Amino acid sequence: MRSIINLILRFGIIELFLIFFVLINVFTFFLYVADKRKAVKNKWRVSEKVLIFFTIAFGGIGALLAMRIARHKTKHTKFKVAVAIGMVIAFISLIHIVHGLTLGREIRYVELEFHSENWPAELDGYRIAFMTDMHIISDEDMRAVAAALNERNLDLLLLGGDFSMGYSHYRGTVREIAQIITTDGIFGVDGNHDDHRRLFSAKEQYGITPLDNSGTRIRDGFYLAGVQDMWNRNPNIQEAVANASADDFVLLVSHNPDVSMVQSTTRIDLILSGHTHGGQITFFGFPMYLLRGSITDYGTRFARGFAYSADGIPVFVSRGIGLYYTIPRIFARPEVVIFTMYNKQG
């Protein structure tokens, strides 16, 4: 079992699945060819159930090639149906494999406008970048993200937690993040994969301010707060926003969006979260994995983008930017989100 895990960690799940996909199609092709030869020589045949099974189980391309080249089973309706089903399954698999190997690894920069009656009009155009779930992102890739963000005139950078704590990998990530230039600084919370003591120590060393059930006034009329991770610690929204004024626009960072369903958010104007990775491996973007209930208690509610807390407060959930070990992102493309803030007249 350990050797299998090491193999997956070394080569990657999607790369191994691609190898499996090619091999099963090659095997299916030769299975059809072998059956054809046995039929010609009136020898023992391969079971039709076996042929159909491998045709449907990702081997549709191999089966189709064998039917064309070896001219085998071409007049059997059930095999035509099996090949049609197998081809659909094969092409859907290929599309997902290609996405995971290409766009699934390319970080995109999402520009959004957020309008609120509570946002100070004098701060219109204020730009806030949010990135989360860095995990095992390489120092080189994090450096590239920092360079890209330094071209986007940021006022504030917020971090949603979840670094790779093993072998002190997180320190390199924090170091590269610290190179991002902002007007008002970089702030962040911890996630469920973080050792908050070590992470916060590294952040402070590099000039990044931890938010630990705490908050601070960034500008007149704009209060920033952050809470502890919901799985590892004790998030307390009321404690985090205790020093905010009634007229402040209050932005809350919480790694896990579920906290917005179990604690009052009535004093908050916008919540930024991560944690769900957009479902990580999805079916054309539909996050089936989230239906298991192991990551969130609210199904696909907090898969990605805007949702609402139990009190009706907007919660934005980012897919994050890193990979969790070697688990690929399939139709859950990594992202950094940049909000440009505006006052909305009532």
Image (tube, rainbow, N blue to C red):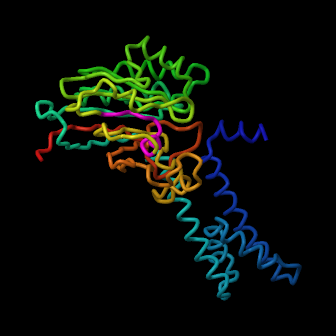
Residue drawn at point x = 44 percent, y = 53 percent: 301
Residue 168 is drawn in which quadrant?
top right
Q: Is residue 243 magenta?
A: no
Residue drawn at point x = 66 percent, y = 88 percent: 75
Q: Is residue 257 magenta?
A: yes
Residue 175 rendering spot, x and y as whole percentages: 43, 18
Q: Which residue is nearer to you in this view: 327 or 62?
A: 327
Residue 251 rendering spot, x and y as whole percentages: 30, 34
Q: Which residue is nearer to you in this view: 37 or 187?
A: 187
- Asked if residue 303 lies left or right of residue 270, the reply is right
- Image vertical order of residue 82 relative to residue 140, above or below: below
Q: Which residue is nearer to you in this view: 286 or 315?
A: 315
Q: Is residue 105 among the parts visible in the rendering?
A: no
Q: Is residue 176 among the parts visible in the rendering?
A: yes
Residue 153 rendering spot, x and y as whole percentages: 22, 28
Q: Quadrant of the N terminus?
A: top right
Q: Which residue is nearer to you in this view: 248 or 210?
A: 248
- Asked if residue 152 lies left or right of residue 272, the reply is left
Give the extent of the magenta segment.
251-261
- Image vertical order of residue 113 relative to residue 145, above or below: below
Count of labels in the image: 0
Residue drawn at point x = 47 percent, y = 24 percent: 139
Residue 37 rendering spot, x and y as whole percentages: 80, 77
